[in-house]
Image (spheres, rainbow, N blue to C red):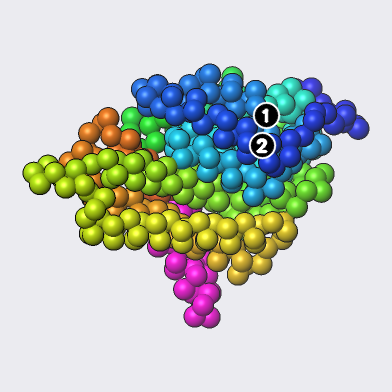
Amino acid sequence: MTAAPETPTPVTSTPLDAAEAVARARALVPAVRAAADETESLRRVPPALIEALRGAGLVRMLTPRRFGGHGLDFDAFIAATLEIARADASVAWCFAFLNIHAWLLAGFPEQAQTEVWTTHPDAAIAYVNVPAGQVTVVDGGFRLAGTWPWASGIDHCDLAILAGVVPPAPGDPPGPPDARLFIVSRADLEIQDTWHVAGLRGTGTHHVVVADTFVPGHRVASLLELREGTGPGRALHPEPIFHLPLLAALAICLAAPILGATLGAYDVWLEAMRARVTTFSREQVAELSHQQIRVAEVAADIRCAELLLRGALDVLRPGGPLTLEQRVLLRRDYAYVATLCLRAVETMYSASGGPANYDSDPLQRRWRDIHAMAAHTAVNLDSAAVNFGRMELGQPLNPKDPLF
């Protein structure tokens, strides 16, 4: 591994502003929509779409300007994600991760950032936060071995950030697990073809296997420090977004594709409702009062989800640190965005009758994808609501919740 120079030379490029980045994302929507069947059949985002995102500069939205990125705020990033998610949830899921994982890398030691971004300015990074493998402490770093589940987008990634627990040394006092994140090169990973699923088929969220690989100490970061927004690399970057705690930033990139896909479902549902007639009486479905009521209910749920997401952006905009109360509230709101979107898509699906059950119906795929996204633990309403309820009632937070 080549050591970083004592004074690294920043990567230079012309950064995009927010309006241009969102416009470029919107311009790619026809290509994303046209590739929907291919994305499903491949069970990953087609390489041409990944290259289109790279060519448009859209994988650098949350990459620090010091390393050639645009250093944009979450407002622009979420707006771009919503545009893509209206067309295809799987592509938006991977697009969001391409950007948020670059944001995550910005918390690692400077040498790690320099090595990655001087070699791969558009580096695509997978991330698995499940500490599933084994970690061994060795001279100069660590050795990793094991299998990590759910590495979304791994087929198009150059690197992976994998979670692991460093075993305590003999004589160490009892304490919480020493969870850390390890940067592993693609060459040291084997992909297990495990992603045979109902929803989000196009994300390629396979398992990855590390047989036995060395990770130098500078490619490792404390999960506790990143959770609090105090990783060693944060001091390099003045942009406010790089000083936010991990979950506050990570979970919004889960909520945004859910909302975007729900907006896309609403688009196709309204189009179908306007064109449909009832089977026997040949009445216009759009003229039926009960369907008009369903439209109002769905639109209200989506509007509430949008307002919650906008409120979250208001909290994130100034950057970190965030209070514990803010973090608990954000997690509740992200989870409730998912809940509202689930409710909306269920109403749309059940109000569509038999046609929605066909593979060819665009609503059916969105129904599957939204359910799959909302199953992510970071937007699970029960665990989020428990901690919010505890806080409101003056009780300590759940001590078993690793996110706090």
Using a 10 Å C-alpha cutoff, classify the residue at mark 1 as few (fewer than 14 neighbours), some (14 to 19) or many (20 or more): some
Please check the rendered image and state whether residue 396 is part of the magenta-colored stretch, yes or no.
Answer: yes
Residue nearest the observer in this picture, 175 or 105: 105
Is 5 on the left or on the right of 331, as rendered? right
Q: Is residue 44 above or below residue 222?
A: above
Which quadrant of the structure image shows residue 196? top left
Q: Is residue 258 above or below residue 93?
A: below
Picture coordinates of residue 373, whole percent (x, y)? 42, 45
Considering the numbered disc 1 on the image, is that residue within a helix, a strand or a loop? loop
Q: In this rendering, does residue 264 appear at all?
A: yes
Q: At 53% from the left edge and 80% from the top edge, which residue is drawn? A: 394
Q: In this rendering, does residue 380 appear at all?
A: no
Is 230 on the left or on the right of 191, as rendered? right
Q: Return the residue at label 2.
A: 21
Is the C terminus in the top left, top right, bottom left or bottom right quadrant?
bottom right
Q: Which label sits in the foreground, 2 or 1?
A: 2
- Tag 2 and tag 1, C-beta contact below 8 Å: yes
Is 355 on the left or on the right of 230, as rendered? left
Please check the rendered image and state whether residue 389 is part of the magenta-colored stretch, yes or no.
Answer: yes
Q: At 81% from the left edge and 48% from the top edge, which residue is drawn? A: 238
Q: Which mark is residue 351?
A: none
Picture coordinates of residue 329, whole percent (x, y)? 55, 66
Which quadrant of the structure image shows residue 277? top left
Q: Return the residue at label 1.
A: 57
Residue nearest the observer in this picture, 358 or 42: 358
Tell me the amino acid under the disc marked 2: Ala
Tell me the amino acid under the disc marked 1: Gly
Residue nearest the observer in this picture, 120 or 404: 120
Q: At 60% from the left edge and 70% from the top edge, which residue is drawn? A: 325
**Where does the magenta region start and end?**
377-404
Picture coordinates of residue 230, whole percent (x, y)? 73, 53
